[in-house]
Amino acid sequence: MARTTVVRTPSSRCEFGIAWTEITPPVGMYHRMWGAASHDRSTGIHRPLRTTVAVMRPLDGGPLTVLVSLDHCLLRAPEMEALLSETCRLTGLNRSELLVTFSHTHSAGYLSRDRADFPGGDLIGPYLDSLPGKIAEAFRAAQTNIRPATLTYGSTTCEMGCQRDYLDEERGHYVCGFNPDEAVPLPLNVIRVTCRTGTLARLAEGENPADGQECPSYVATIVNYPCHTTTLAWENTLVSPDYVGALREVVERETNAPCLFLLAPCGDIGPRDGYVGDTSVADRNGRQVGFAALSVLAGMNPAETDQVYVGPVYSGATLGNWRHRPWDDTRHASTSLAKHAALTVSLPYLASLPKLAEAEPLHRELIAAEQAARAAGRLDEVATLRAKVERQRRLLDRIRPLPQGETYPCPAWAWQWGDAFWIAVEGEPYHYLQSELIRRFPHRPLIVITLGNGTNCSYLPTREAYSKPQLYQPEVALVAPGSLETLTDAIGRQLAEWDS
């Protein structure tokens, strides 16, 4: 077998711009995300929320890709449609150019206009109305600073997140929480975005890039990690980006550049230490991921170089001499390659999916039962019924916007940026989507993004997960067993076409 003499630095080259602005909602706005929560309004701010906009465009001037990340959990179909439409109107973007995703924090507030009659619900509408303008503001700033850039990829693992399908053997059913029996490190992808401040000089034999070469300007860091943003739960009454806030703080303090967090597939992944009210735990979780990201940055090769075996050096021992060498024209061309595909994958609905005609009367019955228990002073019963009412209301939120027919047209997006594949999907797939694509394309950086332009398809569990008694994710899923595997195969076929 031939020995490796060149180790490529995984990279993409494109035009890139980034900007962010604050989107923290007012204190007192409707906040209750958790069925078990006893509060309705937020009482303060842990850390501010952001919207971050990254603009990417091929170096040859092709179409834009505008990636918007919001520090919110998600938006239901009516609010998502309104956000996309108004953002396109304000920015002049086409729908095909815009992808909105979420950090998925469960501590930002429940943004549904039909909660207007709840405590603090009157603030939801005006707040939602303000978001497209904030996004447009960040988009214009990102466009202003767009420039040719090099994206350098690195990865490690991080144990902050953990598998969360846990069998409660005593009760004979599953719960959604830390599963120590399947605790494995999860992939953490880090992208360093730099631009050249001058002409990259050709290096003389034996020199390192730092010798007489102008250092590139640091533009941004992108962190892609699969862990639900659920450190803070029902006991927390503060608006918070959860662990993402401290993660960004750690990275930005070191790099002096914006940090964009992109949530990877984590339908079955949550914090090892989570479901708490203590914001210091969220900060600790974020620092753990942030320091892991910094370790990747510290070990990255210089931008636009590969590591090359130069030959032996005869010293006290015969030494193998490796050096970082600037790219030639062929390498520059390969890292500048840009392709894009929009996919629609038909996924069959669950045969047991409730109909609206059944779900709406049950919702009314549960509300009446909660009111009766409250009037009778049966407070333990009130807490249980309050959670059931909320669960049924969210079921209605999920099934009302579904298209008619036997299948759901699930959208997905794929990009090739140089050496890397980027993928985005709607909804909340299990980590299988990412791990299986890594298995199929081990030589490619893979950036996988969830909650792309909404969550109409809800959770996408593995086929095997549907057989686990009372497991939350299959209970709220809308599509049939095998749907995640079908989606993964469709994306895999597209990537294989580009990889051939």
Image (tube, rainbow, N blue to C red):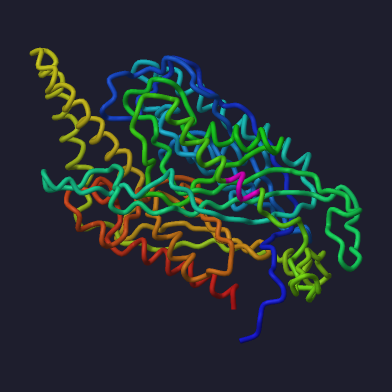
Residue bounds of the magenta highlight:
293-297
Q: Residue at x 59, y 49 (%)?
A: 95
Residue at 91% over, 53% down: 212
Quadrant in the picture for the N terminus: bottom right
> Which one is in front, 327 or 495?
327
Q: Is residue 401 magenta?
A: no
| Residue depicted at 76% across the width and 52% down the height | 149
Q: Is residue 2 left or right of residue 262?
A: right
- Measured from the top left, where is residue 39 in percent x and y? 31, 18
Residue 14 x/y as whole percent:
74, 56
- Residue at 39%, 60% (x, y): give it: 432
- Quarter of the image that includes the C terminus: bottom right
| 456, above or below 71, in the image | below
Q: Is residue 421 above or below residue 216?
A: below
The secondary structure making up most of the magenta span is helix
- Name of the residue lying farthest toward the front: 316
